[in-house]
Amino acid sequence: MERFIQVLVDGIATGSIYAALALALVFIFRSTGIVNFAQGEMAMFSTFVAWGLYEAGVPLALAVLTTLVLSFVAGMVIERGLIRHFEGGEVLTLVIVTLGLFILLNSLAGWIWGFGNRGFPSLFSDEAVTLGGVRLSIESLGIVAVLLAVVGLLFLLFQRTKIGLAMRAAALNPDASALVGVRVGNMLMLGWGLAAMLGALAGVLVAPRLFLDVNLMGAVLIYAFAAAALGGFDSAIGAVVGGWVIGVSENLAGTYVDFIGADLKILVPLAIIFVVLLVRPAGLFGTREVARA
Amino acid sequence: MNESRRRLLLLGGLAVVALLIPFLFGPYRVGQFTMVLVFAVAVLGLNLLIGYSGQISLGHGAFFALGAYTAALLIEKAGVPHLLSVPAAAAVCFAAGFLFGVPALRLHGLYLALVTLGLAIALPQLIKRFDGLTEGTQGLTVDQPAPPGWLPLADDQFIYLLILAVTALMFLLAWNLTRGQLGRAVKAVRDGEIAASTLGVDLAATKTKMFAVSAAYAGVAGALYVFAIAFVAPEAFTLAISFAFLAAIVVGGLATISGALFGALFIEFVPVYASDVNEALTGVVYGGVLIAFMWVLPEGAAGLPRRLSRLAPRRRTPNEQQEKRDGPRGGEWHDEEDADRLAGAAGRTGAGGVRT
């Protein structure tokens, strides 16, 4: 039982990381209708920047904060300089462009930092606390706390501030919002900035648990996709709930189903994506798509 | 000179060049050109899918790997003759593509991209997991086909010509396919799903069949890869190979036969020269090329053949002139076809598909 709870909490912690990246995907999907395939690689790149700063002697917390800000700016630059050109275009075009960005960032990171892997320090202490007879790692609890704090802040931003309102309006109906004076382009840019920042957060949270290398986010991206698909690609709450479900089921399956083990864990999100898209394509919390001739 | 005559001449010229290559170059170069042929088959298959049906797959490396392992295991462990392993790989991949396609192709283009990407990421893990069969990361060494005694050919020349023959056959089949019922139905679906379905095209079945055919092409390429390289290991089938196929298509141009060849040349030789500079340069070039091509061709890569057809003067039948007024769709595979025009006219407002 104790082991079960540990697996559960660990699952929720991992799931929180997936949720952060899934939230980034959802933001961009909601505002621009694009699934950003490069989201994971953007996060990996940010994580390398954080690592570089840390190696250069910057305290870890400061390095991470600086990275978050830089990622925010970089996300906006990518939207303004690259994606803006393709917005409103064909799905195929956008998929190829974001994939191009995926490959480009991956190779650039390899060029700059090499293809080897390295350790990344954790933001949290590696000790454990005992709660009700169960030993839980501080790191896991910390990750969950960070995600909850982020979700809270995002909620405040979108529901309680004028700029959040404008962002929601721009996503909902770009033309109408432009008519009432919302600068739709800037809102999209802001959305990409926020998404890049969320991705960077996911990156620095996951890197200590894996090894930091250029393929750090490959698998994580698939889990985040699964989370977003499960929750519904246009639902923020869905992304969080989806992330937790994916994280927990991945951990449970990896621990208790011998056949799956550590190697085949990656098949769990794939199976979930499949089932969700077939049974309920809009996801748990998403809105249904309607096709018109 | 009329169109078909010119095309025949071009094809003849290409055939002569292709046949001469093994006698003009040393074994190392011949090996590279052999790989070009192998890639061309896979790229052609992916092009049938993306260029024709407008469905995107980021996971064709997975089917390529499946075909390679099918052939390798059949040859090494079951003692099947080399040439028989090719149709076997095709059949296995066709079946796998079909099974994968049944659920996946009911999905919106974006989601299909997503699940196929997942497939490409998961596959190397699968190969490693079933190491009892696949030898895991160690890989499998496979005997290469050897020339029969009466043929005065070196090993590399024989393998090149063997693969050339299979490649030519696959191109011929593709050319035929696109002119047949499936090819027309697929194009109708691409140009307007709703319009096509009102004309009686079974959307899911058509897309699934095309996906399976495309997977079978990747499988054949995989089997040929085994002939050429004589070794399979999971590292050869990472995400990078799927991305390379995609880059090849974008560079070569969608829905063109010659595009598959050109794209294959690109993905064989760019890494060769790029890795001299830096091992990361290949990826930088691929990524840059994908973005740059999309940027220069704002209609998407599907606009490439259309653009070319606007540039290149060619004789048109009255029917084609009609089509030109409706919105030209050039490229050598994009002629005639009633279903095409019907769907095009009915679905002009554009519901899904690559072109709207």
Image: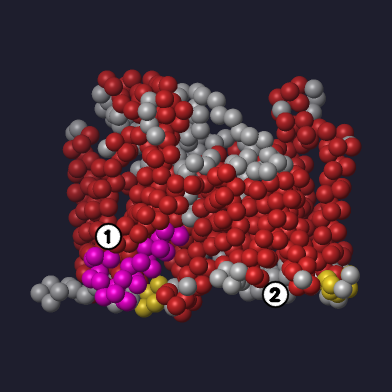
Question: What is the x, y in percent for residue B227?
Answer: 30, 69
Image quadrant holding the N terminus of chain A, namely: bottom right
* Vertical relation: B213 (above or below) A213: above
Colour scheme shown = secondary structure
- Residue type, numbered disc 1: Pro
The range drawn in magenta is B61-85
Q: Quadrant of residue B253?
A: top left
The residue that label 1 is drawn on is B87
Badge 2 element? loop
Closer to the camera in the image, A91 or B212: B212
Q: CA distance from mark 2 to mark 1?
A: 44 Å
What residue do we see at 54% from left, 62% from top?
Answer: B122
Mainly helix, strand or loop, the magenta region?
Answer: helix
Question: What is the x, y in percent for residue A24?
Answer: 72, 49
Question: What is the x, y in percent for residue B149?
Answer: 12, 77
Q: Quadrant of residue A217?
A: bottom right
